[in-house]
Amino acid sequence: MYAANFLLLGAVLFSIGVFGVIARRNAVMVLMSIELILNAVNINLIAFALMNDSAEGHVFALYVIAVAAAEVGVGLAMVLMIYRNRRSIALDELSEMRG
Amino acid sequence: MSALLATEVNVAQNVGFYIIAALMVYGALRVVSTRNVVHAALWLVVVLGGVAAQYILAAAEFVAVSQVMVYIGAVMVLFLFGIMLTRATIGAETDLNNRGWGVGIPVAGLLLAVMVWAVIDEFGSSVIEEPAAPMATTAISDVFLREGLVPFLALSFVLLAAAIGAIVLARKD
Amino acid sequence: MMLAASLSSGWFLENAFLIPLIPAIGFAVIIGFGRRLPKGGSEVGIASMALSLVIAIGTTVQWIQRVGSADGSSGEHALGGVFGFARSVFPAASEGGKGGEAYVEPVIRSWTWWQSGGLEFGLGQHIDGLAVMLLLLVAFISLLVQIFSTEYVAGDRRYTHFFAALTLFSAGMLVMVLAENMIQLILGWEIMGLCSFMLIGHWWEEAANSRAALKAFFTVRVGDMGLLVGTAVIFFGANQWAVENGSNGFSIQAISGWAMSGEASSSVLFWGAVALFIACIGKSGQFPLHTWLPDAMAGPTPVSSLLHSSTMVVAGVFLVARLYPVFYTGFDIGGTNVNLIAVIGAITIVIAAALAFVQNDIKKVLAYSTVSQLGYMMLGLGVGAWLPAVFHIFTHAFFKCCLFLAAGSISHSGSHHSFDMKKDMGGLWRKMPITAGTWMVSTAALCGVPFFSGFFSKDEIIDNAHNNGYNFFYYVGLIGAAMTAAYMTRATYLTFFGTARGAAAGEHHDEHGDAHADDHADDHGHDAHADDHGHDDHHGAQAGPHESPWRITAPLVILAVLAIGSGYLNAPAVGTHYFTDWVEPRGVAVELESYAGDEGHSEALGLAALPRAEEGYSEGCGYTDPAPGTVCYAPKLNHAKFSWGKAAPSILLVALGIGISTWLSLGVFGGRRNPLAGLTSRFAPARWIHTLLVRKYFLDDLYERVIVRAVAHPISRAAYWVNQNILDGVVNGVGRSGRTAGDWVYRNVDQRVVDGAVKASGVVASESGHALQPIQSGRVNQYGALLFGAATVGAILLILLNI
C-alpha cells in the first residue's frame, strides 16, 4: 500500500469539504461539509498511525470523532435556534455581524 | 509504474482502496453539489461508510467501528433530525449555493494543489509495510487510560458541555 | 438420574428468525418502491405481516409439539402429551400429580455478527414459550392493525411512509422478542423507539404532534440509559461464568443460568436489575416516566393501538419476564420482601387509574388505562406471578387493541375526527352497534368481569400476590380493579349512552370551530378517501354518525372474540392451563453439558424432576442453588390455586366500581338528581383532588418547569453574564484603550507634529477602510473562503521557505 494513497484521499476530501463550506448556503449543508473536512483529517491520522505502527494516531482519531459529535450537536442546536428565530437557515441572510 | 509490480505492494489491497476511494470522492462531490438536502445527507453516509472501510484497510478496526457507530449511527441521525426540524423542502431546492460560490473553486483547487504537491513530494514513493495484525484495542485503551487520560477526561467534559449547551440552545423559551 | 428425551423440533422452530426478517425486507421494499405500487406499499406490509404470521403459527404449533414431546417422554401423560389435554381435563390428577416436569430446551441459534477483542456479538434466535407467545401475538395484532390502517389513513399524504414505519416497527419488536443476546435485544428495542417517534409524529405539521413525538423519544431515552448500563453491568458480572460454559455474557440463556447459579454477586445482580428496570420504567410507561404515553396519543389511532397499548409498551414487561432470573434473584422476589418492581407497579396502577377519571379525550382514558394495566403486569412480575403477568400481556393486547381500534372507529365514522367524549360523543350505540358491542366486550374484559379474558389474567395476578405473601400489593390490586371498572364505566357511558352531543349529534360546526374540523379533514385525507370508497353519502356535510366499513369492523370483531376467548387458554376456573404448560419456563435443573448451542438438536435432560410448584413450594431452582454440574434457567414459581371464594373480593369490587360509576355517571352527566353532582364546585377538597388529577400530579410541571429550569436557566444565565460582563468588558476595554491611544496620538502626534501629512494619511486610512469594508460582510461563507484562502497562501509560503 502506497503511503501517499491515504494522504491524497484525505487531501481530496478536505478540498471538497472546503469547497462545500464556501459554496453552500444552507447551514446544515455547511455542517455536513465540515464533517467531510474532519473525516479527511481522520484518514490522515490513521494513515500516519499505520506508518508508524503506533496507537496514538488511533486515539487522536477517536478524539476527533468525539469532538465532531459534540460539534454537530451544538451546531445543529444553533441551526435550530436560528431557524426558530428567523424561519430560515440561509447563511447569507445572517449578516448582523457586518462591519 | 514498476512499483506496482514490486512484491511489497499488495495489489488486491490497492485495488480495493481505489474502488472505495473513487466511490468516496464521487459521494463527497455529490454532497457538495446536490440540490436536495436529504440526498446530500445520504451521500454523506456513503462517504462516511467509505471512510470506515478505509480504516479497516488501514488496520484500524476499533476506529472503524466507532466511525460507523458515532457517525453513521448518531451524527447522521442528528443531521436528518436537523433537516426535518428545520423543515427543509423534501425534494430539489433552488439556490442552495451562495451567490459567490464560485470563489470556492479556486480556493479549494489551490488548497488541493498545495496539499497534493506536498504529499507527493514527501511520500511519493514510500510504501507502507503490511501490518502483522490489526491494531489491538487493548493498545488503544492503554494510550487512552495512561498518557491520554487527561485529554480523555477533558473530552468528557466537552461532551457534557455540548450536551447541556445543545439542550439550552434548542429549548423553546 | 437423567431423563433423556429427544425433543421434537422442526423447520419452523429452527427458522423462526425469518419472522422478523420478512417484515424487515418488507420495510425496505416499501421504502424503496412503495410509492410506485398500486396500493402505495400497504399490500407489501400486509403481505409480509401475513407471511410472518403464518411462520409464527407454524412455530407455535411446533413449540407445542416440542413441549408435548418433553412432557410425554418424561413418563407422564404419554397420551395427552401433544396438547396437554389430559392435564387440562383432569386438573386434580395433574395439579396434585407428582409427575416430574421436564425441562424444555429453547431453540437457540446464533450467528456471529461481529467480533471485537475476542468477544463475539451474535444475532440469533432464542425460541421458548415466552418468545413464541409474543411472536404470534405481535404478528397477529400487527396484521390486524395494518388492515385497519388501510381504511383509517387512506389518502394520507404520507401513506407509504406510514406503512413502512409500521412494518419496520413490527420487525423491531419481533427482533427483540426472539433476541438471543442482549445486544440484539437492544437493537430491536431501539428500532421500536425510532418507529415510535416516527409514528407519533406522523402528522408533524401540527406542533403538538411533533412535541409529543419528541417527548416520547426523550423520556424513553432517559430509561434507555438504564438498559445500556444494566447490560454492561450484567455482562461484566456474567461473562466469566458464561465463558466457562461456552457462551458469553451477552447471551440471555447464559445470563439466566448465571443469575440462578448462586455464584453471582448479589450486588452486581441488584444494581444490574435496578438499571435494567429503569429502562423498563421508561419503555413501559411506569411511574414516574409514564408521562410520555398519554401524549403519544397524538399519533394516528392505529399507532396508539399497536404501539402504545398492545405491543411496544409491553417491551419493558417483556424484558423483566425475559431476564426474570436476574430480577428474581437481584430483588429477592421469592423472599416476600417489598421490592422495586412491585412498588413501582403498584404506584402506577393506582396513579394512572386515578388520572383516567378526569380525562375527556377517549384515547387518553385508554392511554392511562394502558399505563395502569402495565402496572398490573409489573406488579405481577414483582410478586413472583410470572405466568399471570405474561398471560395478562396476552389478553390485554387483544382487548386493549380492540378498545383503541373502537375509539378509532368512532372518530372515523362517528364523531368527525374528534376524540372528545364530552363534546362530540354520547348515544352512539344506536348508530354504531358493532363498534359499541366490541367496545363493551373489551371493556368487560379490561374491567375483569368474570368469564371475560381480563378476569382470568388480572385476577390471577391479584390472587398470586396474596398467595406469595405480598398482602399489601394484594389490596392495591383489588383497589385498582375497582378503579378500572369505574373509569371504564364512565368512559363507556359518556361515549355510547346519554344524549348525543356535538359531532355525534350530527353537528359539524360546534364551538370548536370550522378550522379544527378542516384541519382534521386535511390531516386524515378524509375527503380523498370518501371519494375512493363511495360512502361519501354518509360523509357528506350533514351526515351523522354511522357504522364504519368492514375493514374497520372486521378487525374489531376478531379482536372482541379474542377478548373473550383468549382468557380460556389459561382459565383455572374452567380448568385449563395451556399457558402454564407451554409458556412458563420450567424451573428444573439440567445438566450443564446440555447447554445451548447446537441448533436445537440437543437433548433435554430433566434432572431432579420435581413436582409442579403448588402453593407453599420452597425448594428447587430459585430456593436452593443448583447442584454442581447442573444449572437452572428459571426459578421455580408458586402458583396459587384458583377458587371462586378467593376471586369473590375482586368480583365484588369490580361490580361495586361499575355500579357506583354508573350511578355517578347518570347523576353527573345524565342529569338525574344526585347529591354528588357538582361536588367539585361545592366542596374544596374534591376540587383540589380534581385539579391535581387534571394537572397530572404536576409531574409535567415538575419536569419542565423545575428540573429543566433548575438546570438550564442558571447555565444560560451564567453564559449571559459571562457574555455581558467579561466578553463585552474585554471588547470595550480593547476599544477604550484603542481610543485612548488614538487620543494620545491625536493630541501628541497628529496635532503637534505633522498636521498636513497626518491629514493625508488619515484620508488614506479611511479610504482603505472603506475599501476593505465589503470583506466584513458578516457572511460566514465568505469568512470561510478568506480563512482557507489565507491558509493556502500561508502553506505555500511555508513550503517555499522550507525548501
Image (spheres, rainbow, N blue to C red):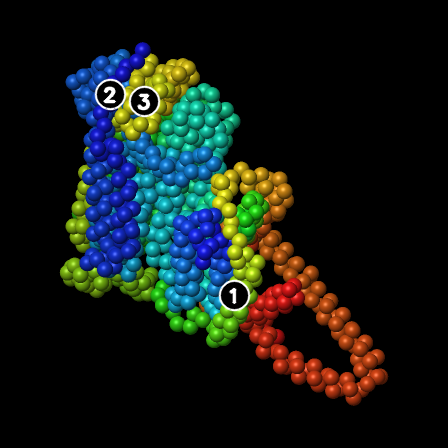
Q: Residue at x 52, y 56 (%)?
A: B125
Q: Quadrant of the N terminus of chain C?
A: top left
Q: Work out which residue is located at the far bottom of the displayed protein and give it.
A: C756
Q: Disc 3 designates what residue?
A: C586
Residue labelled with disc 2: C6
- Chain designation of label 3: C
Helix or strand or loop: what does disc 3 sit on? loop
Q: CA distance from mark 3 to mark 1?
A: 68 Å
Which secondary structure lies at badge 2? loop
SS at mark 1 in the image = helix
The quarter of the picture where the C terminus of chain C appears is bottom right
Q: Which residue is mark 1?
A: B112
On the image, the x and y values in percent for residue C125 come to: 32, 34
Q: What residue do we see at 31% from left, 27% from top? A: C598
Compared with C617, C470 (above or below) is below
Question: Residue flagged by tag 3: what amino acid is it?
Answer: Arg
Quarter-of-image position of residue C173: top left
Give coordinates of residue B93: x percent, y percent. 38, 69
Residue C228 sits above or below residue C527 on the image: above
Same chain assignment for discs 2 and 3: yes
